[in-house]
Structure formats: structure tokens, C-alpha cells
Image (cartoon, grey):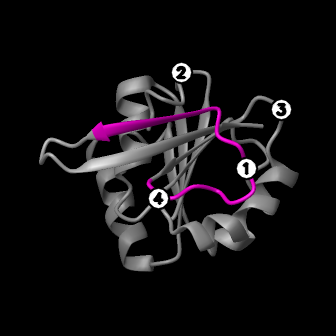
Amino acid sequence: MLDLAEVTSGDLLYDLGSGDGRIPIMAAQEFGCRAVGIELDGKLCRHADEKVREYRLEQRVSFRQQDIFKAEMRDATVVTLYLLTQVNGHLGPRMASQLGQGARVVTLDYPVPGWKPEKEVTVKSEGDVEYTLHLYRR
């Protein structure tokens, strides 16, 4: 997802529904960008915060315990989503109204209804599971 979005150290990535925080953490570690995870589950947020401290990434990564449908993401240059198509559809108008020109949105497996992807690629995990990545550019 991060390679497809061509994440750079100048990006600010938002991961909506960030779970245990692996995408924001990896984005900071491997690409040097700043990253924000938005996750409703407080236990997952606390776990992700612990990992950030463990990896000493406090200056680059933060997590917010928040509803993704209320998240402010105007400053994001990259957004990652691993959410169902219906959820992506509900987020589509919010992202369209908040994201600036050139912002990239990458979804794993589930497209954003009504949006035309710039690129779609199929990738295989180390466990030989196939996924489809969808890249959108605002």
C-alpha cells in the first residue's frame, strides 16, 4: 500500500481504522513520513501507542481514539483504508471534501464506490494470499 502510494518523508499519512497501528508505524520506519492512526477501539490505540514508544517514533507517529466518520484529515497527503466497500462508500464524500489536490488514497481489497482508481494492482502476501490494491488521486 505504501509503495503504491509512493510515500515519501514529506508525506503525512492517515490510516483510518488503524487497528494495532502497523501501517502508520511502518510508514514512519520505512518511508520517514509522519503518520496518524485513527481507531475507535481504545485497547488497540493503547497497544499502538506502546509500540510507538518502544520504537521511539513519538515525533513521527500518533494515534487518535476517534470515530473515522468524524476524523479531521485535511492535512493528510496519503490515506490508507482496509475497510469494507460500504464503509469506504460512506467515507468517500468526507475524503473528497477534506483532502487536497494530489492526495493519494490507497485501499486494500475494497474499492471506494463512485471513485475511479488511477491504478489497481494484485499483490501476494508472504502467506501466498492475494490482495487487490486500489490507488486513487484527488
The answer to if 116 sits in the magenta stretch is: yes
Identified by mark 2, the residue type is Ser
Distance (Cα) linking label 2 and label 3: 18 Å
The residue located at (81%, 61%) in the rendering is 93
Front tag of 3 and 1: 1
- Can residue 106 be seen from the camera position used here? yes
**Of labels 2 and 1, the one closer to you:** 1
Rounded to the nearest angstrom, the CA distance separating label 1 from label 4 is: 16 Å
| Image spot of residue 37 (x, y percent) | 52, 56
Residue furthest to the left in view is 127
Which of pointers 4 and 2 lies earlier in the amino acid sequence? 2
Is residue 53 in view from this perspective?
no
- Cβ atoms at labels 3 and 1 below 8 Å apart: no
Q: Which residue is mark 2?
A: 9
Nearest to the observer: residue 112 or residue 40: 112
Residue located beneath label 1 in the image: 115
Look at 74% across and 59% down and name the residue there. 92
Q: What are the residue bounds of the magenta stretch?
A: 109-123
Q: Disc 1, disc 4: CB below 8 Å?
A: no
